[in-house]
Image (cartoon, rainbow, N blue to C red):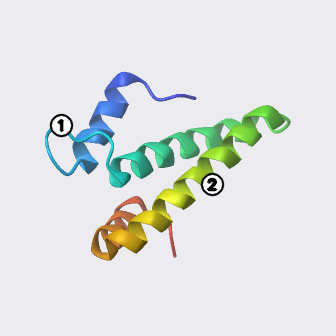
Amino acid sequence: MSLNKENKTKIIDEYARSNKDTGSPEVQIAILSERISNLTEHFQSHKKDNHSRTGLMRLINQRRSLLAYLKKSNKDSYEKLIDKLGIRK
């Protein structure tokens, strides 16, 4: 369910703005999106896991607020990121 170190570093390398970048909104959104997709796969076989569903809703809300911030601060980066992740229409 959680990300292992190799997957997380791969995501960070792919979405980072510079070499040492780990906290930019793009990286955070990409990591949250990966965790959200892992949890949605988990719910295919564990339909009554309501505790994890609460955590999923927290992750979705956190990603939503980061996307709103990125859209407000850097529109081009926002559009590029949502195209790359495929999370919007």
63 to 75, vertically: above or below: above
73 to 13, vertically: above or below: below
81 to 61, vertically: above or below: below
* Tag 2 residue: 61
Task: Between residue 65 and residue 4, name the one nearer to us.
Answer: 65
Apparent side of residue 37 relative to residue 24 in the rendered image (left or right)? right
Q: Secondary structure at mark 1?
A: loop
Q: CA distance from mark 2 to mark 1?
A: 26 Å
Task: Between residue 75 and residue 48, name the one nearer to us.
Answer: 75
* Tag 1 residue: 20
Q: Quadrant of residue 31?
A: top left
Amino acid type, mark 1: Lys
Q: Secondary structure at mark 2?
A: helix
What residue appears at the point 18 percent right and 37 percent down from the top-left corner?
Answer: 20
What residue appears at the point 40 percent right and 59 percent down from the top-left corner?
Answer: 85
Where residue 7 appears, as percent x and y from the top left, is 36, 31
Where residue 87 appears, as percent x and y from the top left, is 49, 63
Amino acid type, mark 2: Asn
Give neighbour class at mark 2: few <14, some 14-19, many 20+ (Cα, 10 Å).
few
Apparent side of residue 39 relative to residue 32 in the rendered image (left or right)? right
**Labels 2 and 1: the sequence-earlier one:** 1
Apparent side of residue 87 relative to residue 39 in the rendered image (left or right)? left
Where residue 13 appears, as percent x and y from the top left, is 22, 41
Q: Name the residue at the top extreme.
A: 5
Give neighbour class at mark 1: few <14, some 14-19, many 20+ (Cα, 10 Å).
few
What residue appears at the point 46 percent right and 29 percent down from the top-left corner?
Answer: 3
